[in-house]
Image (cartoon, rainbow, N blue to C red):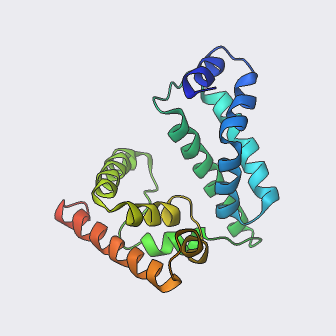
Amino acid sequence: MDDREIMALFQARDEQAIAETLARYGENCRAMARSMLGSPLDAEECVSDTMLKLWNAIPPAEPEHFAAYLYTVLRRTAMDRWEHQRAEKRGGSQIAAALDELSECVSAPDDVTAELERKELAERINRFLGTLKATDRNLFVARYYAMLPVQEIADRFGLSVSNVKIRLMRTRGELKKLLRKEAFL
């Protein structure tokens, strides 16, 4: 079943939408949540929470790109769970390390008025990613979107850990330079 058909099920309030979403994207969602949270149980709960949030959001929301919308909801849900765990001092993951690496380029807004800036920043980062070679773009996305550990990224791409770290450092430097040039930093 494709995304349009899944969206139609959500719009019709058909519970099959959840089953079809899990059939199509469940494994990727679980892997992404597991890499962010470090626990299969937490990942499963995060995916369940994400499905509930989708059910409650669609309708009225009508996302143009269902998969991107799903992964965004999942990431936010995982981040919320991670922050809760961190506040309670009962868990660890790759999120802190990845966010710390990006902190010199991008800071997270804390208020509603910054939403427009966040969208503009996302657009600029997407444009930047489009200028990168495929390998560098995939490394960046694996680290800063999927929040995978550097060792796992190195294994997946057949690179050394130091090579991955250097390439990520250079990419962050290019991103920082671009954001400064465009007066975003």
Q: Where residue 146 sits: x, y (%)? A: 56, 59
Determine whether, in the image, residue 105 is placed left or right of residue 63. Answer: left
Determine whether, in the image, residue 21 is placed left or right of residue 135. Answer: right
Quadrant into which the N terminus falls = top right
Q: Please name whichever residue, 135 or 73, is drawn nearer the observer in this view of the structure.
A: 135
Outermost residue toward the top in this view:
12
Vertical arrangement, residue 9 with respect to residue 103, above or below: above
Vertical arrangement, residue 26 with respect to residue 56, above or below: below
The residue under the point 43% across, 57% down is 109
The residue under the point 49% across, 74% down is 100
Q: Please name whichever residue, 76 or 154, is drawn nearer the observer in this view of the structure.
A: 154
Outermost residue toward the bottom in this view:
162
Q: Please name whichever residue, 76 or 157, is drawn nearer the observer in this view of the structure.
A: 157
Quadrant into which the C terminus falls = bottom left
Residue 55, by quadrant, is: top right
Q: Where residue 91 sits: x, y (%)? A: 74, 70
Q: How many marks?
A: 0
Q: Where residue 88 sits: x, y (%)? A: 75, 68
Vertical arrangement, residue 16 with respect to residue 139, above or below: above
